[in-house]
Image (cartoon, rainbow, N blue to C red):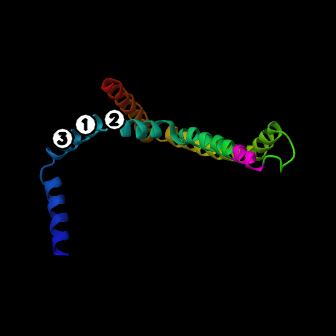
Amino acid sequence: MEAIKSIVHFSFSDIFGHPSQWPIQAFDAACVFVIHHPHVVHIVSFSVFFGPIITLLPLLLIHELVIALLFNLTFLTHGLIPGSADAHYSYLRKILLNARETVFAYVDSTGSTYNKWTMDYAPLAVLRLAALALGCYALYEIRGLQ
């Protein structure tokens, strides 16, 4: 327990004891992280900028994969289930359409709430625009690596 107290005391005294040095060290560490891990920075910063709507692409891919998987599973019962392959495919799409529309409605409502909060509070809008700038810089770094 004493070791933890000494570590915490050392960290706080180190941070607040030299106020002119730790922001520069933190900024340097952040710059090194951005340069060495541009893909992670790009994904996180664009997720902050775009908000909940960024989740639609993976959810759409999962939805289409489920439809394709279920459609291909119907071929295992070839001849046992009446109807053509086209009828099976349209039936699956119609059944799973409600699930997709529910996800879209939820993402739309959370996205509008996210947009309202970021436009009502200036610090959140600045954070969102800073995330855009950082994401663009990370994209530039990614393109520079290729």
**Image quadrant assignment for residue 43:** top left
Q: Marks 3/2: CA distance?
A: 21 Å
Viewport quadrant of the C terminus: top left
Q: Residue at x 41, y 38 (%)?
A: 45
Q: Please state if 38 lies on the left or on the right of 57 as rendered.
A: left
Q: Which residues are magenta?
A: 70-77
Q: Which residue is mark 3?
A: 24
Residue 77 vs 30, above or below: the answer is: below
Q: Residue at x 46, y 36 (%)?
A: 49
Determine contact: label 1, label 3, CB under 8 Å: no
- Which residue ends up furthest to the right in the rendered image? 82
Q: Residue at x 64, y 47 (%)?
A: 106
First in sequence: mark 1 or mark 2? 1
Q: Residues within 10 Å of mark 2 (few under 14, many from 20)?
A: many
Q: Residue at x 72, y 43 (%)?
A: 71
Horizontal and vertical percent for residue 89? Answer: 77, 40
Q: Is residue 68 magenta?
A: no
Q: Amino acid at mark 2?
A: Pro
Q: Which residue is mark 2?
A: 38
Horizontal and vertical percent for residue 119? Answer: 51, 37
First in sequence: mark 1 or mark 3? 3
